[in-house]
Amino acid sequence: MTFEIPAWFAVGSLIVLTLILVADLLIILKRPHIPSMKEATLWVVFYVALALIFAVVLYWVTGSSDAMGQFIAGWLTEYSLSIDNLFVFVLIMAQFSVPRRYQQEVLMVGIIIALVLRAIFIMLGAALIENFSWIFYIFGAFLVFTAWRQAFPGAHDEDAKAESGIVRFLRRFIDISDHYDGAKLRTVVAGKRIWTPMILVFVAIGFTDLIFAIDSIPAIFGITQSPFIVFTANLFALMGLRQLYFLLGGLLDRLKYLHYGIAFILAFIGVKLFFHALHVNELPFINDGEPVEWAPEISTWVSLLVIIAAMAVATIASLASSSREKKAATPDAAAAAVADEKGTPPTVEQPPRSEGPR
């Protein structure tokens, strides 16, 4: 890292971003609703534009294009992982039948939990990197393993099963009602105050956030070792995530190759971390404790291009495959799908024709 981030800029940025996040939360609490496609689109565009403006300001403050590149690469990596996180959020919302009107509040609470957990992991990761350079070997191996796990279908189902286990464990110790009471955590049933199913939703989402924090923090430390850039990249990736949830909607089901793109990114960063570990090696049983000179240092801009290319290829391939499947559907299958959606029979049986006199 050849740049320095002024303290006034770091503190000022975090204050402004926190105020934006709080304002977003207050809007939800004041007017819980289902955002329209137009509203969701405008918010997502606003947060993406805000992230790009922040990258330019970061370049202006530090005078380093490397700082800007690290932020953009880190933000895109965390954004792609956050989109993957939405798949699990969809499963949780469906599993607990969360009323659509209150899903914004649930998502916002999930985002806040994610920020707190990631802030803790960032501080721990920064401390480990500062004192133990060999941690890059562990981070690299962990990311390659995570990439392998991502590349195979069923990862989201496993997360959902783990969450169900946590929920079953929780039900043993606390009384939970069978119905929601708005967005409340507590309600009164037969004169007794008990928890609503909303507490289970928050626990499931919190557990999901913990899993994704463990996966994502080593990934971004493979791009930058600046705790400030790591945290702001995570913050921008999570801001606007709830609007993205409503914007994508059914599109998530069509992004069936997205996990391959994410797996490739994680594997690439894992290899990059391993090379970096060799480049700064201090382990006595590797090259007698000396840095390995042949180990390449992959630049930030190469990483950025790889990340963009991987996500673009995964998205385009997913949409192309979905389009082909839609065109290949038989007329009867299409009619059955529409009939199922409308609740009507796919075909109307014609009465038998009576034979007239010959």
Image (cartoon, rainbow, N blue to C red):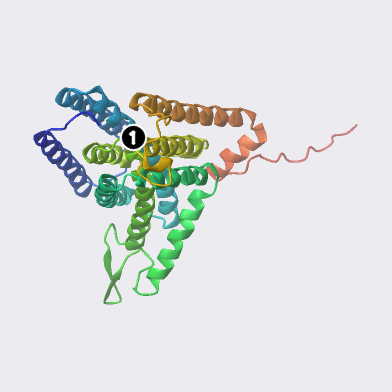
Q: Residue furthest front?
A: 288
Residue in view at x 62 percent, y 44 percent: 345
For residue 175, above or below residue 81 = below
* Residue 93 locus on image (x, y percent): 40, 52
Q: Residue furthest bottom?
A: 191
* Left or right of 115 on screen, residue 90: right
> Which quarter of the picture shows residue 51?
top left
Q: Quadrant of the N terminus?
A: top left
Q: Quadrant of the C terminus?
A: top right
* Left or right of 345 on screen, residue 163: left
Looking at the image, can residue 288 be seen? yes
* Residue 290 locus on image (x, y percent): 37, 39
User: For the residue labelled by badge 1, is the local secondary structure a helix, a strand or a loop?
Assistant: loop
* Left or right of 171 on screen, residue 355: right
For residue 120, above or below residue 6 = below
The foreground one among 293 and 203 is 293
The foreground one among 94 and 290 is 290
Crowd band around label 1 with a 10 angstrom C-alpha radius: few (<14), some (14–19), many (20+): many
For residue 235, above or below residue 72 = below
The foreground one among 172 and 158 is 158
Residue position marked by numbered label 1 in the rendering = 223
Question: Could you tell me how many numbered marks the image carries?
Answer: 1
Question: Please, what is the three-letter code of the amino acid marked with disc 1?
Answer: Ile
* Residue 109 locus on image (x, y percent): 27, 52
* Residue 102 locus on image (x, y percent): 31, 51
Looking at the image, can residue 246 be seen? no
Q: Residue furthest left?
A: 8
